[in-house]
Amino acid sequence: MSGPVAAVRRIGNLVTEGVWRLGFAARFFMLVLLYSGQSLRRVHLTIREIYFSGVLSLLIIVVSGLFVGLVLGLQGYETLQRFGSGDAVGVLVALSLTRELGPVMAALLFASRAGSAVTAEVGLMKTTEQLKAMDMMAVNPIARVVAPRFWGGVIAMPLLAAIFTSMGIFGGWLIGVVVIGVDPGAFWSQMQSAVDFRYDIMNGMIKSFVFGIAVSLIAVFEGFDCHPTAEGISRAITRTVVSSALAILAIDFVLTSFMFRGTS
Amino acid sequence: MAACDRFATLAQSPGDLILTRSHESPLVELKGVRFAYGEREILKGVDLVVPRGKVVAIMGGSGCGKTTLLRLIGGQLRASAGSVVVDGEDLGQVSRERMYALRRRMGMLFQFGALFTDMSVFENVAFPLREHTDLPPELIELLVTMKLNAVGLRGAAHLSPSELSGGMARRVALARAIALDPMLIMYDEPFAGLDPISLGIIGQLIRRLNDALGASTVMVTHDVHESLAIVDHVYFVSEGGIVAQGSPDEIRASTDPFVHQFVHAEADGPVPFHMAAPPIREALLGGRAA
């Protein structure tokens, strides 16, 4: 009898703890927005975080974008050629990247590289009482530490997604035009006529902006909320990567269903 | 140089100056303070006073609520009952803005310094000045140099916190804590883990800086001998309340069993060596006859 009761109790605990954390995260998000004015006024703090989150993520974004483009070009040409549409490989690469792969892959990489680093940094500051010390010096840690990191991530994310997409298209061109020999005129002109700036590119950018908010919020929240021990930081980093990945995929599905529902 | 310090104080927000109260009242006064972490009650009606200009130590065993008391005085925690009054302000009633205005006039030294690891020693000490004043960079540099000189680490200004020993890190944190010439300096276990030389240096700095700045000091510690050499008054905390208090001489001469055990580091006494448990015979023999 105690087995099922204990199981129900555990489930109940998990649910209430989950709801509590969700509420705490929502309140935390409100505080970050509330104190964002202070950090945005001191723009050098945010620029520093754009550098750490964005510029230092460039290598992985550029290399991954290039390889994703190369693979898309290869696979796309292979399939399109069967239907006599090998020239359309540029369209396939561009649409895949601008609408989906660019924002999603860049966000996943951003969560792994920059999100985990932000969680570790904020978590370590909490563990070594740096956040408490700041608070005791009458400096709000959310305004001074959290908000700049949050906005740094939000601003860097769409830029990284754009760079990822551009590198992917370059990779597709390398494979399609340089290696396979697709006509460059057909490659670029078909892409130009098929890709719509507002419908494809802007929607992709909106997606990456939303992913930036989600990943940055998860990263700073997990760092701020972590248990102040080495194990606590480790768990917080894991939660950042896992929660970010799940959030990105779930948000992507929701946004895609609104943005690209049954239209060309 | 002293003029620079005064200027730094005046450069704080005008609202801070309004906080200055009568110098006759104690700087810190706790009355009937109770506090619990969840169901576990840590403090059960503590009365404590920190007179202006004095160095007061709060002593007691590990986990007795010393640091909790310090956090209550710093406004990091709120008492569940009773009042914590700092410079005439009841911390249970003040807004966050008012609390921050008060904290600009407090300095706190954390147990391990809590230096900002992404900043140099110089930047750490300059941090409160940059955050709370509009002083020109040249004056900030001057003030930081003076503060670092006061703790004997002017030569370490360019180092990063990771290059400092434990004692040096605490001295830098002390320089940071006094950057804005606070009215109240709080120390959380300032002597923990230090070698004898660093321990002596920190002890002397605590006394000297308190007197030089005209500040008041609250120090949480269990280092009896070093503390009794520098403090004006000692409170002993045990089982959620103040069990003894007095001047260092009174404490040394005390016949109170708890104070005697604590001061003379006796293994057994009012604080028992053995934690409450079933009799050893029962534990070893499982209830069988010997």
Image: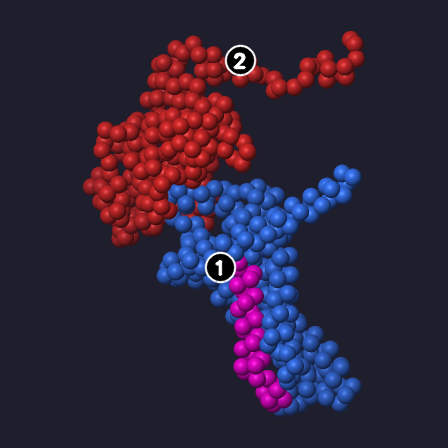
**Foreground: A179 or B46?**
B46
The verdict on residue A205 being magenta is yes
Give me the residue at 47% from left, 28% from top.
B43
Report how many numbered discs are placed on residues in the image.
2
Give me the residue at 33% from left, 28% from top.
B50
Q: Is residue A140 visible?
A: yes
**Number of the label disc, if any, that sits on residue A150:** 1
Q: Is residue A15 left or right of residue A51?
A: right
User: 10 Å neighbourhood of mark 2: few (<14), some, or many (≥20)?
Assistant: few
Residue B134 pos. (x, y %): 27, 53
Q: Chain of mark 1?
A: A
Give me the residue at 76% from left, 81% from top.
A78
Q: Is residue B231 left or right of residue B161?
A: left
**Number of the label disc, if any, that sits on residue A182:** none
Q: Which residues are magenta?
A: A188-217
Tell me the shade of chain B. red
Residue A32 pos. (x, y %): 46, 57
User: 10 Å neighbourhood of mark 1: few (<14), some, or many (≥20)?
Assistant: many
Q: Chain of mark 2?
A: B
Residue indicated by mark 2: B269
Residue A44's place in the image compared with B70, above or below, is below
What type is the residue that disc 2 sits on?
Gly
User: Secondary structure of the magenta portion, mostly?
Assistant: helix
In the image, the chain rendered in blue is A
**Foreground: A21 or B135?**
A21
